[in-house]
Image: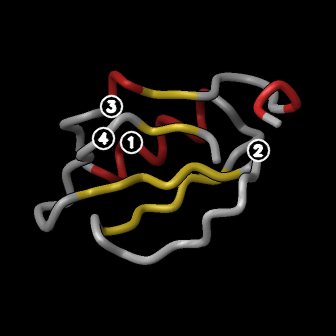
Amino acid sequence: MASECFGKRSWRELVGVKGQIAATTIERENPLVHAHVVLEGTVVTHDFRCDRVWVWVDSNGIVTRELRIG
């Protein structure tokens, strides 16, 4: 499935950045995706989508892991 996705697909460099800044950066670098900021531990759907990136943040709003399309 991942081979069907276009544009940049992961953002390791955003770990440690504020979630909203990360979401804006992702959408600027790949306008085919929508970034959703979610708190670590939140239950989300596990279906794979080329147009979505979960932006995982801690209670301070800081990105906690490498962000990927999915």
User: Which corner quadrant holds the N terminus?
Assistant: top right
Residue sitting at 52 percent across and 72 percent down? 44
Which callout, 2 or 3, points at the residue further toward the start of the chain?
Answer: 3
In the rendered structure, the answer to whether residue 61 lies left or right of residue 32 reads left
Residue sitting at 59 percent across and 34 percent down? 28
Which callout, 1 or 2, points at the residue further toward the start of the chain?
Answer: 1
Q: Is residue 58 above or below residue 64?
A: below
* Residue 11, x across and y down, in percent: 45, 28
Q: Quadrant of residue 60?
A: bottom left
Which callout, 4 or 2, points at the residue further toward the start of the chain?
Answer: 2
In the rendered structure, the answer to whether residue 27 lies left or right of residue 57 reads right
The answer to the question of whether label 2 and label 3 lie on touching residues, with beta carbons closer than 8 A, is: no
Q: Is residue 42 above or below residue 12?
A: below
In the rendered structure, the answer to whether residue 4 lies left or right of residue 43 reads right
Q: Mark 3 — residue?
A: 14
Question: Cα distance, mark 1 to mark 3?
Answer: 6 Å
| Tag in front: 2 or 3 | 2
Q: Mark 2 — residue?
A: 50
Question: Cα distance, mark 4 to mark 1?
Answer: 11 Å
Q: Amino acid at mark 3?
A: Leu
